[in-house]
Image: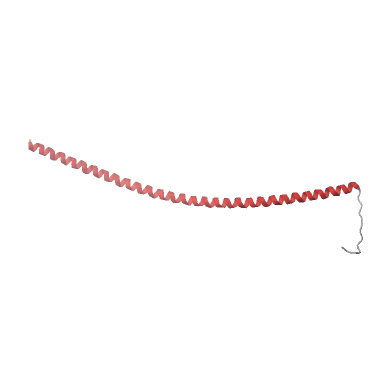
């Protein structure tokens, strides 16, 4: 402070002084509200960042699941074709065995018939 400065007095009407005090109090309240709002905005921004991280992770997991499902479908198709081939080969084998068994039974019956005729 300057040593040569003079102290000056300012006068206000009581009503004007009351308005000034109310304005100063309102200003302090507004500053506190602004501070609180800024803190809330920071908290919201932090939560949004966390949520975006979770969304990104879930998206990555979904991509991995889609790849796994695709691989399982391809494996299922290969297994299906293998089983169909085995079934076809088995059907053919069964009919051949039935034919051989039927032929063997026919030959056995014919031999039995011939033996039976010869013996009589």
List x then y, in percent, for residue 51.
60, 50
Q: Residue at x 9, y 37 (%)?
A: 117
Q: Residue at x 63, y 50 (%)?
A: 47
Q: Is residue 10 left or right of residue 57?
A: right
Q: Residue furthest top?
A: 120
Which of these two is toward me, 5 or 99? 5
The structure's colour scheme is secondary structure
For the N terminus, which image quadrant? bottom right
List x then y, in percent, for residue 19.
86, 47
Q: Residue furthest bottom?
A: 3
On screen, residue 5 above or below 18: below
Label tally? 0
Q: Residue furthest front?
A: 3
Q: Residue at x 38, y 48 (%)?
A: 79
List x then y, in percent, for residue 55.
57, 50
Which of these two is toward me, 72 or 89? 72
For the C terminus, which image quadrant? top left
Which of these two is toward me, 17 or 102? 17
Q: Is residue 24 left or right of residue 107?
A: right
Q: Is residue 114 left or right of residue 31?
A: left
List x then y, in percent, for residue 105.
18, 40
On screen, residue 4 above or below 63: below
Q: Residue at x 62, y 52 (%)?
A: 49
């Amino acid at each position: 402070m300057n040593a040569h400065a003079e102290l000056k007095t300012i006068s206000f009407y009581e009503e004007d002084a009351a308005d000034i005090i109310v304005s100063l109090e309102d200003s302090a309240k507004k500053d506190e509200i602004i501070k609180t709002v800024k803190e809330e905005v920071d908290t919201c921004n932090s939560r949004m960042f966390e949520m975006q991280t979770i969304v990104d992770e879930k998206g990555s997991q979904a991509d991995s699941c889609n790849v796994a499902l695709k691989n399982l479908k391809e494996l299922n198709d290969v297994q299906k074709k293998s089983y169909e081939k085995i079934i076809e080969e088995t059907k053919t084998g069964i009919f051949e065995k039935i034919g051989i068994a039927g032929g063997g039974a026919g030959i056995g019956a014919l031999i039995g018939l011939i033996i039976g005729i010869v013996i009589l």
